[in-house]
Image (cartoon, grey):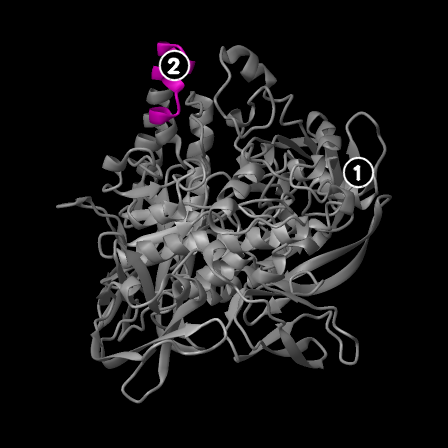
Amino acid sequence: MILNLTGKVTKIACGLLCCCTMTYAQNNDTSDVVILDVGWEFSQAGTDKWMSATIPGTVHQDLLHHNLLPNPFYGTNEEKIQWIENEDWEYKTAFMVSEDQLKRDGAQLIFEGLDTYADVYLNGSLLLKADNMFVGYTLPIKSTLRKGENHLQIYFHSPIRQTLPQYDSNGFNYPADNDHHEKHLSVFTRKAPYSYGWDWGIRMVTSGVWRPVTLRFYDVATISDYHVKQMLLTDEAASLSNELIIDNISEETTAEVEIKVSLDGTNVTEEKQSVILQPGINHIAIPVEISQPVRWMPNGWGKPTLYDFSAQIFANGKVVAAQSHRIGLRTIRVVNEKDKDGESFYFEVNGIPMFAKGANYIPQDAMLPSVTPERYQTLFRDIREANMNIVRVWGGGVYEDDYFYDLADENGILVWQDFMFACTPYPSDPTFMKRVETEADFNIRRLRNHASLAMWCGNNEILEALKYWGFQKKFTSEVYQGMLSGYDKLFRELLPAMVNKLDTDRFYVHSSPYFANWGRPESWGIGDSHNWGVWYGKKPFESSDTDIPRFMSEFGFQSFPEMKTIATFAAPEDYQIESKVMNAHQKSSIGNALIRTYMERDYVVPDKFEDFVYVGLVLQSKGIRHGLEAHRRNRPYCMGTMYWQLNDSWPVVSWSSIDYYGNWKALHYEAKRAFEPLLIDPIQQNDSLCIYILSDRLDNMEQMKLEMKVIDFDGKPIGKKNQINSLTIPANTSLCVYKEDFSTKLTQEELQRCFLQLTLKDKSGHTLAESIHYFKKTRELLLPQTTVSYKMKQTDGKCELTITSSKLAKDVFIEVPFQGARFSDNFFDLLPGEHKTVVITSTSIKKGEKLPLTIKHIRETYN
């Protein structure tokens, strides 16, 4: 286990290949870890033309580095890179081993990820024939090493040609329609499904050493697994079992195993145990008790407290092996029980029902090694700042990097973890099943120590597909029955057995959704739902008010990214919604036309492409916010909402709320508002305006006051201010506090040129929540022409922008040309006479340099 990757760097001559810089990782044991990340070369098999390579990486990234590929994200270049997947590729490096290193008891070569069919050779010996992208490999290599120069070579087989014999002998083409090839080969390979294409994804079937490679020299023993198992948690004490698997390569050895637990650098408890290590695998369990434990809490409920656990093995007075984990003490239960309304589905954290607020996550890049620690950090800042408490790692991507789960732990974000299966039946032959068993074993062990890991899910939408996507008619009875049988083997037998064996206390569900279908209302009362009535069903956004599930684990609506992102893949002549380039970056066949259809319902459709993009961003945000608030409003019947999707893997038209370059779309700002812990939610229900207070707070709030003012778009009050006093808002609730027919109070014209301003205050007069309600759809409003003026104060990296308008400026969008620039707020309504300060941060902002900035609002897009 590498405990610290910021180690010392030593220059060592590495033979003919290069003069190689080898990084030695600093450890708190006596092992010697070398990171093999330099001196690599790659070649297309059969060409013997070797070029420098980056590890971790992919063939695509290395070819791009040598200018041998066009930018795959630009224009229609996707079609120009497809040849890569049909070729075999070779990687090689050389490294030096000293006499002292060879004297160590053992040596291991550790691959954290090989993509995917890879033959590994060391000094002429075949060490491994890898066949699964989702597992790591630890190879004993002491007998294969040589003093001096050692040669490591990896032969990557084309994932296409490798699986063609399986396809040809299968007898039918699997219904994996997101695999953008006439032959659906992706199902045969344990490789990220999205890399074969998706309805938001580029087809980029990668190969390469996609996660780090290390060389480890050690004595006596290693810790191959360390599980901190929570046995009991109360306010008085936490009882834990520290379960270690120790691999002893020496003869019988007396060792001392020590467990230390600390919190914020202060030692909490310590346990030691002397053991006789038998040769080979040893299972050791050491109990630890922590008094007065501090619980890990989800975002919005408190601090996600983490304890530092370390396990050390002492032999002959030296620490020969060590591992450490950061552990959160908490209880998480998925309550999935029959009740009067059907079958519940919600998360109970530390004994309290939690309304889940979040989104579905896909891989952040089509080339996974491009995702830096900084990108992970930014992502979790985006998640936390949007008031989310959960994220779903969707089953068509990858089991994420360890750092992803570390950040989830640190930010109090629950993780719904899918196994990597999505949207199609899969094989269930013995070889495939064995690969899946190995994959499940590896990833359950790797992830189970994380406090954030809330549940396991077998797959995405495969049961729904088998039931409702027409497979019964498309395939013979024999083939279809085989698919059903295979489903049971994989998702009802193998995977739950692995979870039960390795992660006993965590919830497992075999599919999402496991019963519901968006076209069948009778199913919405059971478990989780993916409701695509909005979008594929072309239902209005208002259908979210009545199409209520017990838990909404997917729903969504598309938008284009903003223009600065479109400019990275298209030229001005391509700025048409049905241009060849726009269609190349729109993977949903009905997408662009459907955006326009929905826009016509709620907005005045602009003529200019740039304005269409902007209004489309607003359209997406308002539509999805409508659903988020409907789900929160209907608690406790509905106890969670996760929209599709959080992010993008390339610059594309999609359902995301954050684009590929990290820019928040309007949807992310609206999700932040809809997920506020305390929210005023006005909604027209039949003839009445109903005002709900939605609270995710854990405390009861008393003596609250709700102020209601009707104001016209010029800032003039209409009628008298209304006020509700002495409100009590219970913890964790949805409460209707007002209901009245407002249409009788205002004329038809007033309904079109006024808004209702709502303010919730505590007994001291402090504002706790605010909201604006319009009585008509945007296209029916008599929006005024107005100019937004601004003043700015600029320093390096930061701009404070104060804006104002004499009249209502609806859905104000502040735009700067810098990718990933952050705004304290954007896509908001600027009220008449209001002065609002927005802070913009970006490393591209420089003091004294004019900031290229534009501001637009909805009325400006009218012809």
Q: Amino acid at mark 1?
A: Leu
Q: Residue at x 34, y 38 (%)?
A: 513
Q: Residue at x 73, y 69 (%)?
A: 844
Left or right relative to 313: residue 478 = left
Amino acid on which disc 2 is placed: Lys
Q: Which mark is residue 294?
A: none
Q: Nearer the viewer, residue 448 or 684?
A: 684
> Pointer 1: residues within 10 angstroms few (<14), some, or many (20+)?
some
Q: What residue would you read off at disc 2?
A: 473
Judge whether 34 appears above or below 176 on screen.
below
Quarter of the image for residue 410 reads bottom left
Residue at horizontal 76%, vertical 76%? Answer: 846
- On residue 69, which mark appears? 1
Q: Quadrant of residue 464?
A: top left
Q: Earlier in the sequence, mark 2 or mark 1?
A: 1
Residue 286 visible in the displayed image: no
The residue stretch that appears in magenta: 466-481
Q: Position of residue 234 (x, y in %)?
A: 22, 68
